[in-house]
Image (cartoon, rainbow, N blue to C red):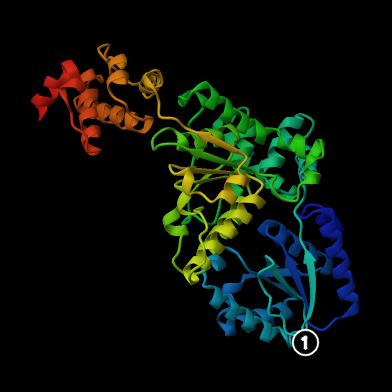
Amino acid sequence: MTPSEELEGLEVDQATGAKLKNLATHLSKAKTDAPVVRLIGESDSALRGAAEAFCLVFRRSMLLVELTQLADESRLAKLLRDSQLWQAILVVQSGGPTAQEADAQHVRQVETILWNRLREFKEPVLLLGPPTGFVQVPPEVSLWRVEVVAPDFEARRKAWSSELGKEATEAETSRLADTFQFGPRRIRQTMNLAAGLAAVRDPESPQPTTGDLLDSGRALTAPQVGHFVVQIKPRYTWEDIVLPPDKMRQLRSIAAWMQFRRRVHEEWGFGQKLSRGKGLNVLFTGPSGTGKTMAAEILAHELSLELLQIDLSSVISKYIGETEKNLSAIFREAEQSQSLLFFDEADSLFGKRTEVKDAHDRYANIEVNYLLQRVEQYEGVVVLATNLQRNLDDAFLRRIKEVVDFPFPDEKLRERIWRAHFPSGAPKEADIDFNFLAGQFKLSGGNIKNVVLSAAFLAAAEGRSITMADLILGLRTELRKEGKLCTKSDFGPYYELIQKTD
């Protein structure tokens, strides 16, 4: 296969492919000393695709290595030697999973080692990564810079349509193109994986569904920041959440916003007016246990997105600049599949900026400033949940597209919540008085879930159906856990049951 034909399958847009082809042709003819090509971009897959495109035009193979693996200077010397012997182009990637865990000072030291060796190296070398990398360029090194852009939405949609054939609907190809920033090659990989899933499910008729394609695409874009996020497989649907009608309408409008954003941005041209802010930033407020996390799961399920809950304990660091670096890694990985990012207890990260009185205040403000910019740049869905909206920075609130206030459930909603927490297959006795439970105990949905689960395990341990008595004992445990008294006025005719079991 000729390089020009192969270029069409790589994950870069046409303009980037043309630039790389022209630059490689020029360098091969000009015989420039130490031609170092700096490929700049945020998408790892697009950067690697650009590197492959460059190597193909040069008609050479590729030696790919992470920057942090070059701390051993002898290893770097061997790689440079091998690239000459095998006529391969050395490709050094900065900003990958390994670099994200490395100390910034250590990364700069490794860059210095690399630049020192490249001063005398006479073969082409590619340096991949975001704009913040490889900045200390020696004056004697010939450096060429190319901005790498991934295929845009329309190019991706056409690629999906071409690979899936006439049977695919425009809605299906648009959904896949909107979810994954894939070029033709990874689209083919996705289809192969989906075919395998379909064959395992039904070997007689192994026809991949849209769900198979979405699952396969997520498998190819699994985030490399597992210690910073908790991946949640969304299971809740609209039927599982109990909210007032106006709040349900708000949530459904949020889902519709994402489902039709491409029509508004691409077909209607509104995207041309926006340099940033094409994503959806949503704030969920309200007391604990009122359904904020469940609502985030429902949105992810409805939009067929991966749900990444940010682990604040591992993201927030006491060292200056580390928190921003960790968040940058999360956003870069999430952009590969437009995952839904869920920040619980968001006020700990997006707190109000304060007057600068010392260095701590200054760097805390820098952290919030970075978050404001990065959230606005992200084109996916960001959901923040907090019990304390007043603690959020005002500048961030201005960037929020939708605020959903989750109220504490009233008696009618509580009865629906009690009933909703019993799965259809759960055995329960007819003596359960949902009216009594909802009217006597002002509990949130989270508390009710705990009570029902506690009752279910009590019944399961004795091999019988769930009874009202099990729920009363579960209530006693939940109330005492929160430091509340179990009074006769609350438990009424069931108070004797509590006294007997105390």
Quarter containing the C terminus: top left
Q: Residue at x 82, y 59 (%)?
A: 16
Q: Position of residue 320 (x, y in %)?
A: 50, 69
237 or 190: which is nearer to us? 237
Give the left or right position of residue 159, taking residue 219 as reference.
right
Residue 168 seen from this side = no
314 relative to 407, above or below: below
Q: Residue at x 22, y 34 (%)?
A: 484
Q: Is residue 312 left or right of residue 282?
A: left
The residue located at (75%, 71%) in the rendering is 38
Image quarter in which the N terminus is found: bottom right
The residue that mark 1 highlights is: 140
Nearer to me, 381 or 8: 381
Image coordinates for residue 446, horizontal then vertical, percent = 36, 33
Could you say which quadrant of the image residue 304 lies in? top right
38 relative to 294 in the view: left or right: right
Residue 330: where, in percent of width, then height?
56, 55
Residue 318: x %, y % from top left: 44, 66
Residue 224's place in the image compared with 191, above or below, is: below
How many labels were placed on the picture? 1
Callout 1 amino acid: Glu
Q: How crowded is the residue under tag 1: few (<14 C-alpha within 10 Å), some, or many (20+)?
A: few
